[in-house]
Image: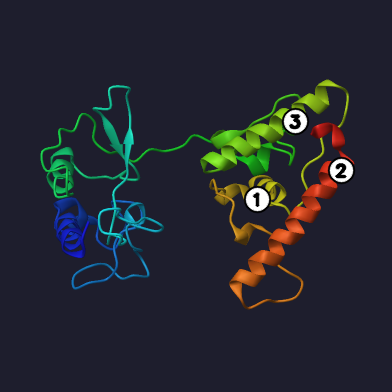
């Protein structure tokens, strides 16, 4: 999308009846647009995240587009595609009208419209140990979204960890949770130690890692040091429990 195409799409989106009713309360698409005229303040709605052209160059022009839309193939015939990141609360008719403003989708036929989905998850802080075992039934493990993590990598990581711990338990060894400084440990520390009354699933972020003992203002340097500490802690843990490899 060019800036003009993006602005036209955005203006149409913000003009929809559902948006007008919810203005200032919530977002229709995850992370809605920057402030311009009648648009919501930047502090409440960031730029449309699925459309940010980070790292993408148009091979025809050699330039980065103003905004992009990712299509994901859904069948072997390659005649059905999913618009990535476009979950929303809009009426189906409104979705069709506004999405056809996207270049290339003017004549698109929509076989399924976007909807906001909810994940099912347990209350990890009440039920789980940092080994992903249930506190009251230690022969039962939880992993993936249901244990309270968000994201593909996080789900795969907890599945790997639960499998390793289950294997240790099956051979008579004691499952041992990963160290707090590493990403594994920090994510599971949140999943098992957060306030049970306010628990919400989370991705791994630098904010979940332990703060440095000495304050570092430069974010890049701060993150580098956190990563170094995390890697050392993880290697020590793997060395101590070599059978987990």
The residue nearer to you, when weighing 76 against 222, is 76
Classify mark 1: residues with Cα within 10 Å, few (<14), some (14-19) or many (20+): many
Q: Earlier in the sequence, mark 2 or mark 3?
A: 3
Which corner quadrant of the image does residue 243 belong to? top right
195 up-or-down from 73: above or below: below
Q: Which residue is mark 2?
A: 239
Q: Nearer the viewer, residue 68 or 167?
A: 68
Give the left or right position of residue 168, taking residue 119 as reference.
right
Looking at the rendered structure, the secondary structure element under dot 2 is helix
Secondary structure state at the residue bearing disc 3: helix
Front residue of 57/24: it is 57
Q: Residue at x 34, y 42 (%)?
A: 84
Q: Residue 136: image x %, image y %? A: 75, 30
Mark toward the start of the polypeptide (1 vs 2): 1
Distance, label 1 to label 2, CA atoms, is: 24 Å
Label 1 sits on residue? 190
């Amino acid at each position: 999308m060019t800036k003009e195409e993006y602005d036209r799409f955005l203006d149409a989106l913000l003009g929809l009846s559902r948006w007008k009713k919810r203005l200032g309360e919530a977002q229709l698409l995850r992370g809605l647009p920057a402030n311009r005229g009648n648009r919501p303040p930047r502090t409440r709605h960031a730029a449309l995240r699925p459309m940010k052209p980070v790292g993408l160059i148009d091979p025809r022009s050699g330039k980065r587009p103003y905004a992009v839309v990712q299509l994901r193939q859904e069948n072997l015939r390659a005649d059905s595609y999913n618009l990535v990141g476009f979950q929303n609360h809009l009426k189906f008719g409104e979705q069709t009208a506004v999405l056809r403003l996207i270049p290339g989708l003017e004549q698109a036929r929509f076989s399924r419209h976007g909807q906001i989905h909810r994940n099912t998850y347990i209350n990890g802080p009440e039920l789980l140990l940092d080994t992903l075992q249930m506190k009251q039934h230690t022969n039962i493990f939880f992993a993936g979204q249901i244990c309270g993590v968000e994201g593909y990598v996080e789900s795969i990581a907890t599945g790997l960890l639960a499998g390793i711990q289950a294997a240790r338990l099956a051979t008579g060894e004691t499952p041992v949770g990963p160290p707090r400084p590493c990403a594994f440990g920090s994510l599971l520390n949140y999943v098992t130690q957060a306030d049970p009354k306010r628990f919400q699933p989370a991705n791994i972020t630098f904010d979940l890692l332990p703060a440095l003992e000495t304050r570092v203002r430069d974010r890049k340097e701060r993150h580098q040091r956190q990563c170094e500490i995390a890697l050392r802690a993880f290697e020590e843990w793997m060395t101590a429990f070599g059978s987990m490899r």
